[in-house]
Amino acid sequence: MPNNDSFYKKVLDNLYDGIYFVDEQRRITYWNKGAQMLTGYGEKEVIGRNCHDIFLHLDSNGNGICSDACPIEKTITDGRKRDEESFLHHKDGHLVPVCLRVAPIQDTDGQMVVAVEVTGDHSPRHALRQQLENLQRLALCDPLTTIANRRYVEMSLNSRLEEMRRYGWHFGILFLDVDHFKQINDTHGHDTGDRVLKMVAKTLVNSARSFDVVGRWGGEEFIAVLANISRRQLPRIADRFRHLVEQSSFRLDDRLLRVTVSVGATMSHLDDTVESLVQRADTLMYRSKEAGRNCVSIGFGEEMPETSATPAASASP
């Protein structure tokens, strides 16, 4: 590890948070780029000056704290760390909400130096933005399985269709339906049914690549949107999804509960809409049901579908 001032100054200068040092007279001795970004003041404007002469700190009610309640002054006096939320005046005049962290340190000469970290985005507006982002995430997330919901899948399909028309990038889609799901609910109860849906959802997501989208379409139905694949690759990928679900299980009382899925697989067409693409995959999925379930039916709209059937029991000891 390098042991020189220029190395550590370079590290501090490249932090996003504002960092500055003051001496025992509260004069600023160091000022990083993060502090400049938060306050609008450059290094040459602040070095050697007292902080309260430049960017007056205020408490959460807008009262000045630089004279009677200055956290920096308190730390200089008692040597204790402090962490406070406050406002500071930006060079342009507006107030910037920050979290102020103050810590005493000693320099190489043994003199007291106070390090001040100023972190932005602690405002109610930031909290509201975070809340809106969380609400957006929740609005696109299935609450039971925590994977993408139908709305997000539809958005992804629209995006892929637009890419296909613009760049010629075709993609695949799988429509998967849990076999005998009503029987599972009737026999073992809805709590067990929910466990099954969570298990299938996690298996499907873990089977997908990072740029694929797997979502719950509704009930016991799932859709996988597969980018960057060809017709030749589609059967192998679809059967891999089917097989991995078949191998999933959890213990229920004295036995393992396993489920299977029926799969419809197809590729996108230039004249497809979200509705036509999903309908084609859905129709193929029902052909897998008719073929005995736990199989994949593949079709591209121009010819009869191919079906690979491998029936399996829904539960095993």
Image (cartoon, rainbow, N blue to C red):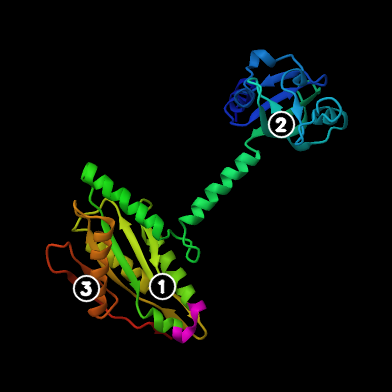
Residue 253 x %, y %: 52, 85
Where is mark 3, residue-wise? 308
Could you tell me what secondary structure mostly forms the magenta stretch?
Answer: helix
Alpha-carbon span between mark 1 and mark 2: 54 Å
Dot 1 or dot 3: first in sequence order is 1
- Mark 2 or 3: in front is 2
The residue at 35%/52% (across/down) is 156
The residue at 46%/77% (across/down) is 193
Q: Nearer the viewer, residue 78 or 49?
A: 49
Q: How busy is the neighbourhood of tag 3: few (under 14 within 10 Å), some, or many (20 plus)?
A: some
Residue 46 x %, y %: 69, 16
Q: Which mark, residue 248?
A: 1
Q: Can residue 216 be seen?
A: yes
Q: How busy is the neighbourhood of tag 2: few (under 14 within 10 Å), some, or many (20 plus)?
A: many
Whether the magenta-drawn stretch holds residue 191 is answered as yes
Alpha-carbon span between mark 1 and mark 3: 20 Å
Where is mark 2, residue-wise? 87
Q: Which residues are magenta?
A: 186-192
| SS at circle 1 | loop
The residue at 22%/62% (across/down) is 266
Q: Nearer the viewer, residue 291 or 132?
A: 132
Q: How busy is the neighbourhood of tag 1: few (under 14 within 10 Å), some, or many (20 plus)?
A: some
Dot 2 or dot 3: first in sequence order is 2
Q: Amino acid at mark 2?
A: Phe
Q: Can residue 209 be seen?
A: no
Location of residue 211 with respect to 285 vertically, above or below: above
Kindly give the residue lying farthest to the left in the view shown.
Answer: 303
- The quadrant of the picture occupied by the N terminus is top right
